[in-house]
Structures are given as C-alpha cells and as structure tokens.
Amino acid sequence: MDPTQRDLFVRLERFYDAVPRDAARGEQHGGLVLFVREGAGWPFYARPRLDATAPPSLADVAAVRERQRELGLPEAFEWVHETTPDLLAVARAAGLNVLEAPLMVLDPAALPDPGTLTDVPVWLLDPDAPGFAVDVAARRAVATVGFTAAGTARGEAGPAARDAAMAGLDTRALDEERARIADGRRLSALAGTPEQGALASGMAMRVGDVAEIAGVATLPAARRRGLGAAVTAVLARELLAAGTDLVFLSAGGEEIARVYLRVGFRRVGTACIAEPTALV
C-alpha cells in the first residue's frame, strides 16, 4: 500500500470511529469496540479498535456477540478489509455472513451537474422549514421501502407503500436531526414531485473534512429515472461546498456501484458488513 492509500484508509478509520461517539459509548472487547447508543435511536455496531495492537480474534467476536445479545442489539460488525484483512476469515469462522461492499471515493472533478441526471427536483432538508418533520419522516420511509426491495430493478412499491411506512417522530429525534444539520454534521436530501411526494432519499454524515454518503434509496416504482444518482450528486456538491475534501460511500453491490460511477465515485477498497446468517 503506497503512502497516499495508507493516508486515505487512516482517515477513513478515524471517521468510522468518530461518527458513533456523539450518541454512543464505546465498550472495548479485545481488538474490537462495540458502540452502544445512549437512549433511543438506530443501533450501532462493533468495529476494530483504532489502537488495537493485534487483529480481532474469534474470541473477541464471540465476546461482542454475547454482549450484543445481552443488550438486545443486532449482532453487527463493520470494517474495511484493506485495513483489517484478517477479520474476514475470523467473521466467517464465527458463522457470520459477510457482505463485501464496494468502498468508493469521490473524484470531485468527475462530479456531474445533478440536473443532467434527472428532471425530478431534488432538495436538501431545511431544519427551519415548516415541513421539516414531514420531510424527515418521508426520508426514513423511502429508505425503509427502498431497502426492503434492495437493488436497482423496478418494482410495484411506490408512494402508497411509502405512506404506509411513515411513522411519527418524537421531539428528541427531530431535535437531534435539526442540531446535526445546523452544525454541518449531517445532510439529508429528497427527490420527488408535488403530485407523488418523496420518491428517493439519502443522507450524509460529516466529521471535519471527511463525509460519508449513506442511505440512498429509491422507491422501486420510481427506479431507473436517475433519482438515486441525482440525490447522491446533490449531497456531494453540498459537501464539497462546505469544505469537505474526502467524500466516500459503500455500495450495496456491483450493480449499485455502477450508479455511483456515473456520479464520479471510484472504487478504492471493500467495506465489510457482517451479521448472523438468516435462518430460512
């Protein structure tokens, strides 16, 4: 690994370690750290420790899984293969299913104008707008429906499925979203029309000059219209304008990675996401 690549992966590891710490405490288990959220919200995962002197062992994975079950958390692990290559075999030996997701970094010079990707409007969520709460709920509902039918193929689920998935948000969740958008730690975007409402959504998490775009999803009935690419491009342009010089994401597979290639992202490695094999 050349010095430039090494610096890139060091920056990514620092980002991955920093993101959960606003809302979670870190519990050390050998070569792993388990992030445990304080209060309600999306549960976190375990990752390799930044200061570990040895790669995580099978015993470390077993200890974390036992702790996750004790706390009622998903048995989830995330890492970058190029940084912690030994963990892939360990996770599989522990009986975990590992998704090897393309890890991609933005080339700012290759970022297209979002208007060339779709004719559907894309907007950033404004915490001061009257419809902010509805937009946040819509972003989450679109993601729920979109990721339930993963991939890029068109399907039947559309606005009605989104509306059925809409859920009210408590004051704490909305206050957290407002605060993080206001101080630049988060961006959220929607694409849609006045007639159909939100059709695609996405968000970005930012720590200093590094940001990850995540949760990009499109309702199956609205796919193949460039919406996911346009949402990604709008988020990326806003991040660059705010001074972010490293924008990255993890694609759900090779087919999805091709969407991001259109937006100026290139593959630099593999992000691993491990969880227990689903029982049939």
Image (cartoon, grey):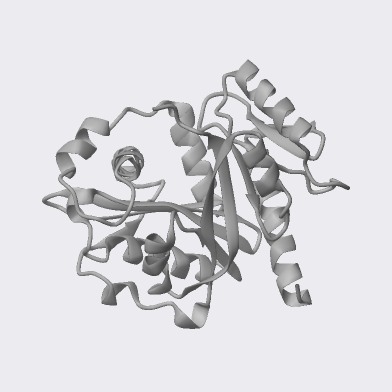
Percent position (x, y) of residue 147? 35, 44
Residue drawn at 46 percent across, 58 percent down = 251
Q: In this view, does 76 lie to the left or right of 57?
A: left
Viewer-proximal residue among 278 and 20: 278
Residue drawn at 67 percent across, 54 percent down = 15
Q: Is residue 46 visible?
A: yes
Percent position (x, y) of residue 28? 79, 33
Percent position (x, y) of residue 22? 65, 39
Viewer-proximal residue among 87 and 269: 87
Q: Is residue 188 visible?
A: no
Q: In this view, does 153 lie to the left or right of 185?
A: left
| Residue at the left extreme of this rendering | 195
Quadrant assignment for the C terminus:
top left
Q: In this view, does 180 lie above or below 243?
A: above
Q: Is residue 108 left or right of residue 150?
A: right
Viewer-proximal residue among 74 and 143: 74
Viewer-proximal residue among 124 and 115: 115
Q: In which quarter of the image is residue 122?
A: bottom left
